[in-house]
Image (cartoon, rainbow, N blue to C red):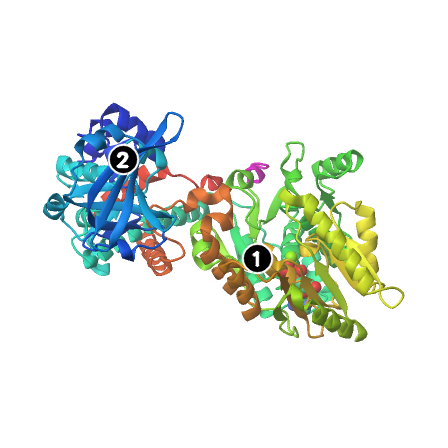
Amino acid sequence: MNNLLETPIEYLKGVGPQRGDLLRKEMGIFKYGDLINLYPNRYIDRTRYYKINELQDTTAEVQVVGKIIHLKTVEFAKGKSRLVATFTDDTGQMELVWFQGQKWIRESVKLNIPYVVFGKTNSFNTMFSMAHPEMELLTEHEQNLRSAMQPVYPSTEKLVQRGITNKAVNKMMMQLFTETQALFTETLPGYILEELKLIPKNAALFNIHFPKSQELLLKAQFRLKFEELFFIQLQLITKNLIRKHKIKGHPFDKVGVNFTEFYNHHLPFDLTGAQKKVLREIRNDLGSNAQMNRLLQGDVGSGKTIVALMSMLLALDNGFQSCLMAPTEILANQHFYGITELAKPLNLNIKLLTGSTKTKERNIIHEELENGSLDILIGTHALLEDKVQFKNLGFAIIDEQHRFGVEQRSKLWKKNDIPPHILVMTATPIPRTLAMSLYGDLDISIIDELPPGRKPIQTVHRYDSNRLKVWRFLKDEIAKGRQIYIVYPLIQESEKMDYKDLMDGYEGISRDFPLPQYAVSIVHGKMKAAEKDAEMKRFSEGKTNIMVATTVIEVGVNVPNASVMIIESAERFGLSQLHQLRGRVGRGAEQSYCILMTGQKLSHDSKTRMETMVRTNDGFEIAEVDLKLRGPGDIMGKQQSGVLNLQIADLVKDKEILLLARHHALKLLKEDASMEKPEHQTLRRVFIELSKKKNIWNYIS
Ligand code: ADP
Ligand code: MG
């Protein structure tokens, strides 16, 4: 049976070499098995017929019963024509249109006989039209109607143009079931089917393509989603187990002088309970013989920096170097200053390596890394260059912010024989389902508590037309001694225009907040680093009241006296960026505010983003909304979309199924880690096959 599923697709009756080629190129369907796994996007109720006067401008397909009363060829450009049919029912008229295959349609279509036409409608000048409809005589249609729910398969324009319509795919699918007699191997162990009341694989595949009822369709979907997520979780968890058993790590069993000294004498504040908990988790990992691979999540301002530093001190105390890699230069800078500041009393050798590090400094770094006198290296991708060789890298922190690909992580990994312990930090929280799918092979630590004494930031949304009122509010705040950020978007594609907006904004603000009563700073990407630093310094020392900036300040500054964040054109920012920006205020004892300025006209998504920001300060909740709005692929970036290319499950909608799949995968592997029990034989085989095909977690190997 499994061999049959390996049959090249062109051998399926009705496919042949040409169509086979198209299916391969357009859909990646090479074999019978690929076709059977082409699951419908949705189902249409083929017992629902629309009247022509019920049609509306939507993108959904509809089904209309009527007669063709007239056919004509319309030339719309030299040598180019379309065939247009006038189609009527008792409520009105519409047009059917063909560009391809006109001759054949003209010859085969029958006038004045009831047809069922099916397709998407467009409206031109109040007249609806349907291009390249699927058509059937009403009598045939009634005979063929097997199921009320007709599957709609994913497709491409090219496929449809070349005649592989949805109807054609339907036929192929039926043919496939006939040829294979629908004998598909059960992939899940019987006891799981029983416990979760899952329908067998055969029934699931049949009903996903030809649902016998709504109820069976739901069961089929549930079973196939579970299966998909279950095998992914098996892979992730297996990786984690293998690592823990097989991959040696440096055991950091000493708590030495640096850590103790820092902990006892130089902590600038009491650690929160959550910070302590996370540090304990990290220390446990580091003290074992296995390599640590841990994800550290925490909201903006939850205090990840100090956790990062103290973990690196543990490495240092055990005679190892550490590094911290950030996705951007600004972030790397920020980490460098933050960590240097915290670690000042310890007299460590901490250096920064980025694209703008001068050759001379670079050479010193290379040398100190190799002779072991450099304790901590902080930087960007520059850390991955071949020239960067550590004497003994024992601990690597990756501040990921979703931007590093799998290959890059593994590059860091290969810098030493025994891999360093790895802590992946995320700048913004990741929804639980995503974390479980993308980082399911990592252990997860969460800082779920903000440092004490923070007043929740009050966020409001204001339209540009209310600017005067906002300005008055700012003047009141400045009168109280507070400072203010005003941030403008800077998005690469339209950098010039953004820059102009920023400058115009700056001029306006300077006019509205004139010297000598007010002082306004400006910082943007085109300024020299020294200028930027000087301007930032003026602001942080309280010499200016307002800081006008681009998103460079998203991560760049920490000025506790700044209590208002104005975000201009807030509709142009994504949720996580808005949340990051807001995190720049609320760091002092005063009540802080975030004001989102937008134009009057907002898209639905923009509105949702503003409403979400106004409603909550919780980064995890914001991340969930972001996931719903943008989908997993966009959030995590292309590099990691492989993991998210799910066939049927949906990380947004199928959270419960994911939790269930993870639970059962964990349980199974706990009892039978190498899947050797008789009841796991098939499972094991499928698992191995799948791992060969989709080994997307290669950074562990
Ligand atoms: P994150 O990187 O998680 O966004 P940071 O590490 O930059 O957060 O910390 C945010 C701010 O909170 C910093 O000013 C830091 O000094 C302060 N902070 C961190 N932990 C504590 C704590 N336990 N008590 C008081 N303040 C803290
Ligand atoms: Mg930080």
Kindly identify which residue carries mark 1: 576
| Ligand 1 sits in quadrant | bottom right
Q: Residue 315 at x, y = what percent? A: 63, 50
- Residue occupying image coordinates x 45% and y 51%: 632
Q: Quadrant of residue 388?
A: top right
- Residue 503 lies left or right of residue 318; in this view the side is right
- The extreme right residue here reads 516
Local crowd size for mark 2, using a 10 Å CA cut-off: few (<14), some (14–19), many (≥20): few
Label placed on residue 72: 2
Q: Is residue 371 visible?
A: yes
For the magenta stretch, what is the residue range? 411-418
In three-dimensional space, the C-alpha distance between marks 2 and 1, rounded to whole angstroms, equals 55 Å
Where's residue 193, x and y in %?
Answer: 21, 55
Q: Image height check: is 229 above or below 606?
A: above
Q: What residue type is labelled 1?
A: Ser
Q: Check the image and report above or below for 376 versus 13.
A: below
Question: Please, what secondary structure does the residue beneath circle 1 have?
Answer: helix
